[in-house]
Amino acid sequence: MATVQMSVSPEDLSQVPRGNERIPEAGILVIFGASGDLTRRKLLPALFHLEQAGLLPERFAIVGVARRPLGEEFAATMRTSIVEFGSVEAGDSRLDGFVERISYFPLKFDNPADYTDLKAELERIAQKKSIGGRRMFYLATAPEFFAGIIENLGAQGMAQPGQGRVAVVIEKPFGHDLASARALNYQVNAVFDESQVFRIDHYLGKETVQNILVFRFANGIFEPIWNRNYIDHVQITMAETLGVEGRGPFYEKAGALRDVVQNHMMELLSLVALEPPSSFEAESVRREKLKVWRAIPSIPILNAVRGQYGPGLVNGERVVGYRDEARVNPESGTETYAAVKLQIENWRWAGVPFYLRAGKRLRKRATEINIQFKQPPLLIFDRLATSSPCQQIQPNLLTLRIQPDEGIALRFGAKVPTTPEMAVCPVNMDFDYEEAFGKSSANGYERLLLDAMLGDQTLFAHRDGVETTWALYTPILKAWAAKPPEVFPNYLAGSWGPECSDHLLERAQHEWRNNLGRKA
Ligand code: BG6
């Protein structure tokens, strides 16, 4: 398909304000679960990037907390990780100053006495570095420890804002169904006020996800057609080529629906579907998202399909099936693929199907939102174009590429030159983030960490939202648990998922768009 590229002018770019006016106050960030992957791969590189951008306060300490008896070696490991996962060379002297901010404190999550010691340690650091009372507790542990940690922080009086704001950041998964999410919300809110709670969904930290709102509400031309009168259906795909990457035990209990559909994909859906918020502030944005989720009627079980990958070829490499992954039950019924069809019953969207699919070990890595518009009321060129290279006039398609190849494309029909007939061919108008703005080293956590430190909850999940999305998916999870799948594995690694997923769309004469990405 021919492509027209679009770019940003250097003059426009030079006028973009750089936001270093948003620097949080001095404080201590305490990361529970600091010996885990998330800290190494995402959090510390993001904090380093923030420091390099001048967005960390001068008086700021990072305390890693975990069960293992790590000492000085913790800071050294973090240094190596920042080089591996961040954008800096090993010998760079900027790392020295950053690493000095880091210390480690061993703690058993369920031992109250350890929290007394932690409290004393934080006071010692605060005094030594003149940091004051501001604290942010980041829960990056396995979810079974969340409630205990929160309770202990509460019991030690560490949740109370004293001489500074205290916040808690909670990683996903936030519960594993409606009942457990409710219970966790109850435990969290028994200790922390909701205004102190930051439930992370790292998708909301992605630039392209935030850009959905900018695209819709900072431009005048799309919103008038952003509704059931012009849009035929919406597809949201989160395709991964990765398997479970050593996280077998976690994934066995999660599955695709819990792992990414209930959270990341529902966030994407809400941003596509919400009404214009009155401002870009937590309260307004969260209220509009909640309205979208609440307008979704319960999803009939027929409109939810699941799959599990068998062995196959991914990017030319032979990979094992899910049941042969390390620490996975050889007869596992866990889904590595899930797709649903849902409706949003409100004035704007009634009758427009939204299709969501997510899977591991698929053909290509791509997270994309495809908005397919209705055909024009009369296809006056269709008849004339039968002998053309493009047999059918294709409907307009707006593609929001969340990752990779971050950008936006609009497909429309153009006359094929030099043909005597009015032959119409689809072409793409394409905006590419990297071409326009250069490559970004941000991993999404920079923005979220910064916002949490600043106390801005706009890009974080609220308790009502979490419970509403769990309420939608819990019946499906229950039905699936009650009836184990008969034909798992049902798709090959490296394919586009199980056949039943295609049937889900065929019923409405739709089909999944599989040539995803820019270089499709
Ligand atoms: C996480 C899931 O939340 O998101 C993982 O637990 C998944 O299973 C990951 O791989 C995908 O994130 P990203 O940013 O790579 O799309």
Image (cartoon, rainbow, N blue to C red):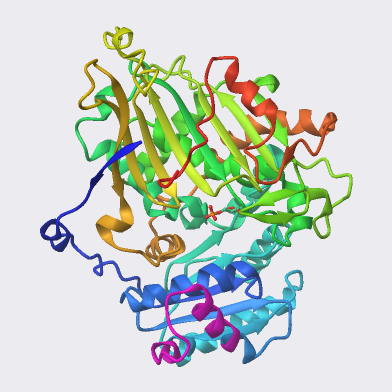
**Which sits in the foreground, 481 or 346?**
481
Q: Does residue 381 lie above or below 437 as drawn?
A: above
- Tell me the quarter of the picture where residue 78 sits: bottom right
Q: How many marks?
A: 0
Q: Does residue 10 lie above or below 259 as drawn?
A: below
Residue 505 among magenta residues: no
Query: Is residue 426 visible in the rendered structure shown here?
Result: yes
The residue sitting at 43% across, 33% down in the picture is 370
- Tell me the quarter of the picture where residue 233 sits: top left
The residue sitting at 13% across, 56% down in the picture is 12
Q: Does residue 213 lie above or below 158 as drawn?
A: above
Mostly what secondary structure, the magenta segment?
Answer: helix
**Which sits in the foreground, 71 or 145?**
71
Q: Position of residue 36 (x, y in %)?
A: 66, 71
Q: Position of residue 355 (x, y in %)?
A: 54, 28
Location of the C terminus (image quadrant): top left
Residue 86 among magenta residues: yes
- The region drawn magenta spans 76-97
Query: Is residue 134 visible in the rendered structure shown here?
Result: no
**Which sits in the foreground, 365 or 355?**
365
Q: Position of residue 478 (x, y in %)?
A: 77, 31
Q: Does residue 95 lie above or below 455 as drawn?
A: below
Q: Is residue 335 left or right of residue 47?
A: right
